[in-house]
Image (cartoon, rainbow, N blue to C red):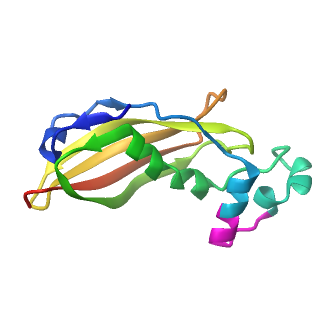
Amino acid sequence: MPAVFASPADLVGAEGRILGPSSWVTIDQGRIQAFADATGDQQWIHTDPARAADGPFGATIAHGFLTLSLTAAFAEELLRVDGTAQVINYGADKLRFLQPVLVGSRVRAVGEITSAASGASGVRLGYRLTVEIEGVERPALVVDTVTLFVPESV
């Protein structure tokens, strides 16, 4: 269930608010291969299950950027801001890949609002997303993101 804010202005003062967790997503070989095909990153550690079985992880692993790409869907599930005309992804301030995601793993995200500031165009929201791997203590990644929420009235 997402955290719901009635307007972008309501984000100001929400620093420290925990978001989530999201639902689990299974990382299967089909998803990994589709990402490899879309990006051209065909490294054997991602795309060759037979070779990867003898590799450092004992199986194929998801691309780090595949895991990162899931954060957009996770964010949609974690946060809803009504009264917006547009939501603009400003990017990331910090990103760390901490743990490989083995094929067959399930991942989900939890978030925390780290900053919210009003400006002429709307509210710029900073939030940290941590992508967890089911049954693994260390997260797959932690990313500090920045998103601009433009209110309907601008």
Estimate the x, y position of residue 79 in percent, counting from the top left.
33, 40
Taking the image as shown, residue 120 lies to the left or right of residue 53, namely left
Quarter of the image that includes the C terminus = bottom left
Tell me where the magenta segment starts and ends, as one range. 35-43
**91 or 154, nearer to the observer:** 154
Estimate the x, y position of residue 75 in percent, counting from the top left.
40, 45
- Is-magenta flag for residue 114? no
- Is-magenta flag for residue 41? yes
From this view, report whether residue 63 is shown above or below residue 129: below
Q: How many marks?
A: 0
From this view, report whether residue 21 is shown above or below residue 66: above
Q: Residue at x 53, y 48 (%)?
A: 96
Estimate the x, y position of residue 68 in percent, counting from the top left.
53, 53
The outermost residue toward the bottom is 40
Instruction: Quadrant for residue 35, please give it.
Output: bottom right
Q: Residue at x 66, y 26 (%)?
A: 135
Taking the image as shown, residue 131 lies to the left or right of residue 9, namely right
Quarter of the image that includes the N terminus = top left
Estimate the x, y position of residue 31 in percent, counting from the top left.
68, 55
Q: Residue at x 15, y 44 (%)?
A: 7
**125 or 86, nearer to the observer:** 86
Taking the image as shown, residue 3 lies to the left or right of residue 102, namely left
From this view, report whether residue 22 is shown above or below residue 126: above
**99 or 76, nearer to the observer:** 76
From this view, report whether residue 19 is shown above or below residue 53: above
